[in-house]
Amino acid sequence: MTTNAVIQMKDIDIHEEVREHYAKHATSLLEGRAEQACCDSACTCGYPATEINALPEDVAQASWGCGDPVSLAALKPGQRVLDLGSGGGLDCLLSAQRVGESGWVIGVDMTPQMLSLAWRNAAKVGLRNVEFRYGHIEHLPVESDSIDVILSNCVINLSPDKPAVFREAYRVLRAGGKFAVSDVVSDGDIPTAALADLDSLAGCVSGAMKESDYLDAIKAAGFEDVRVVDRGQHTQVPGSNVQAYSARVEAFKR
Ligand SMILES: C[S@@+](CC[C@H](N)C(=O)[O-])C[C@H]1O[C@@H](n2cnc3c(N)ncnc32)[C@H](O)[C@@H]1O
């Protein structure tokens, strides 16, 4: 087997593992079972409490993020927004409220159960300026130069090909557009043994890329003014001395 074939097989396994993990979370909420709530009235995950508390409880619970990319995006009415790995749709719904009826929000996700949950949640909130598309963030089902702002929340760390995600983000963003993400990065290289721990990977820990490499990969895709805006909670990567932590990162297509 060639090296490329090995890498491709590994990539397919990672997508499958991640999809299975998040399908279970989505199915719990679709079937009315309580989920481990990230966002509720007690803990709003860094989102403005007024916005979270205005949503139905089960809509706000559909949150597996690691920060608030929507506030970082500083959205304006009329903008077209794309959310990479939109999950249950929380960031899309908050964005749709901010861009208003003249704006449009697209969420892309590879887990069908998450797409069902997101459509259900958009209907519950009564928003019509949002859609959810099936796809992989490494090959976005989105037209080139068509998006004003790209968001993502705790997803790119799950990708087996992060440089491809940044290249695709750059392709679909229009000139002058903003990339604003919350993600998990690390303070060192993740050891190979930890990379093979698919539970830790699907749980947004061992797939983390070293922060400096993450920023370099964004720049290599063509983005400018790339910076970490703030950093959040740390967790130790199992079987290593490496720390993984959330970070909000912004960049621009000039
Ligand atoms: C940790 S959850 C975050 C969901 C959402 N962004 C949030 O904040 O609640 C990760 C989501 O990304 C999706 N995902 C992971 N890797 C993906 C990929 N390569 N392409 C598309 N979606 C992906 C999963 O299906 C899941 O819905």
Image (cartoon, rainbow, N blue to C red):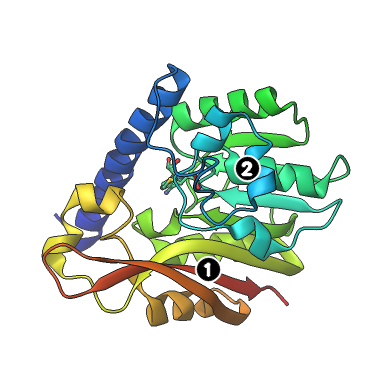
Check the image and report above or below for 147 versus 186: above
| Disc 1 C-beta below 8 A from ligand 1 | no
**Quarter containing the C terminus:** bottom right
Tell me the kind of residue under disc 2: Ile
Q: Nearer the viewer, residue 23 or 219?
A: 23
Q: Is residue 106 visible?
A: no
Check the image and report above or below for 80 versus 189: above
Residue 35's x, y, as percent? 39, 31
Residue that appears at 11% across and 65% down? 239
Is 14 on the left or on the right of 128, as rendered? left
Helix, strand or loop at label 2? It is: helix
Residue 165's x, y, as percent? 49, 60
**Quarter containing the N terminus:** bottom left
Label 1: few (<14), some or many (≥20) within 10 Å?
many
Residue 162's x, y, as percent? 41, 63
- Give the quarter of the image for residue 46: bottom right
For mark 2, what is the residue?
Answer: 52
Helix, strand or loop at label 1? It is: strand
Label 2: few (<14), some or many (≥20) within 10 Å?
many
| Most distant residue in the top direction | 31
Is 237 on the left or on the right of 98, as rendered? left
Residue 200's x, y, as percent? 23, 53
Tally of marks = 2
For mark 1, what is the residue?
Answer: 248
Tell me the kind of residue under disc 1: Arg
